[in-house]
Amino acid sequence: MNRSNQSPLLILPNESDIYQDVSRDEADWEFLNFNARTFRKGQQWMHETGEHEYAIVLLSGNFSVQSNRGNWSTINGRKDVFSGVAHTLYLPRRTKFTLTADSEILDVGIGWCETDEDHPAYLKQPAECAVELRGGDNANRQINSLLQPGFDCHRLVCVEVYTPSGNWSSFPAHKHDERILDEAGNLLEARLEEIYFYKIDKPQGYAIQQVYTYDRSLDEMVRVNNNGLVLVPKGYHPVVAGHGYNVYYLNFLTGSDQSLANTDDPDHKWIYGTWQGQDPRLPLVTAQMNGK
């Protein structure tokens, strides 16, 4: 893990096949682990999930997997994250598998966490992913649900988000760092650990992310480049895409509930309902783009 000198929350990419890597111990978390890695054609990764559930998100290329839970392959993997929607392979605990790169370069993002539950392995196809356009005006973005709340797993939640150049994202800012129930026992906010893993559509591009608590006991502002990783241990965490640069980020979350329940920053909640329209550039990607 290569932390930036600028911020304890920003992790810079490494010059290796495993170019992002953070464990729950390094992040001082209870559950969440993540890495991003590339493979050359024919290269294999043999692994066992142990007492963890895994999600393997296809960032670019194609792979095949053989395992004691089943066999799968992708044939229409996107050439990069701006050329289609992800395939996502969910693997339960106690799965032995071999992943083989079937393209010249394979790029994947992998999230995992401990579990004491058994769920079925499943390869989620791009066409199965619900797409939501959230916000409006210049706070407009696209969310693709990969492992959405209610997906048949234990703790993992995963979405990918596209923010057009110059737009705000994860805004109005929200948090999910404590478990809150209403009087009827309904979940209002979950306690979740979260990573933001970034891809930018031009190599010199960047996004700016803030992570802050309402009392500003935590208040970090980071400039994030391609393949950068931001940890969100607590607090609100808005993003803005640099002008001229479309921004992608992959979110993995785990915690108290398999949920995205959150609480808005009360100072900015008034912005809901003020938007006059949607950015005509959205959606930036569709499942129909895959394989072209």
Image (tube, rainbow, N blue to C red):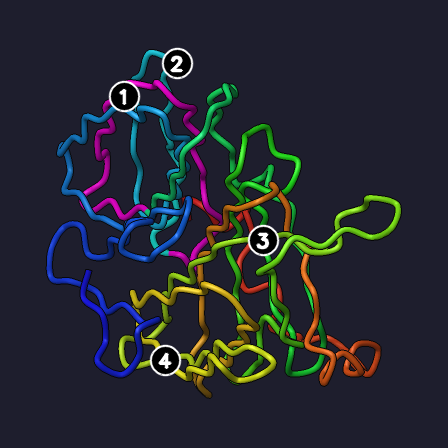
Instruction: Say whether disc 2 or disc 1 marks the residue closer to the N-terminus.
Output: 2
Question: Of the residues tagged 2 and 3, which is closer to the observer?
Answer: 3
Q: Amino acid at mark 2?
A: Arg
Circle 4 SS class = loop
Quadrant in which residue 215 is drawn: bottom right
Q: Amino acid at mark 1?
A: Phe
**Up/down of 118 relative to 52, above or below:** above
Residue placed at 46% from the left, 51% from the top?
Answer: 252
Screen quadrant of the N terminus:
bottom left
> Residue 191's mark?
3
User: Residues under labels 1 and 4: Cα distance?
Assistant: 36 Å
**Which class describes the residues within 10 Å of circle 3: few (<14), some (14-19), or many (20+)?**
many
User: Residues under labels 3 and 1: Cα distance?
Assistant: 31 Å
Which residue is under mark 2? 69
Please say if the residues under marks 2 and 1 sit with CB atoms less than 8 Å apart: yes
| Residue 14 picture location, percent across and down | 15, 62
Please say if the residues under marks 1 and 4 sit with CB atoms less than 8 Å apart: no
Give the magenta-colored segment's residue range. Answer: 81-108
Q: Is residue 237 magenta?
A: no
Circle 3 SS class = strand
Camera-side residue of 254 and 13: 254
Instruction: Say whether disc 1 or disc 4 marks the residue closer to the N-terminus.
Output: 1
| Residue 147 picture location, percent across and down | 55, 41
Which residue is under mark 4? 206
Instruction: Say whether disc 2 or disc 3 marks the residue closer to the N-terminus.
Output: 2
Camera-side residue of 103 and 114: 114
Camera-side residue of 233 and 205: 233
Which residue is under mark 1? 97
**Which class describes the residues within 10 Å of circle 2: few (<14), some (14-19), or many (20+)?**
some
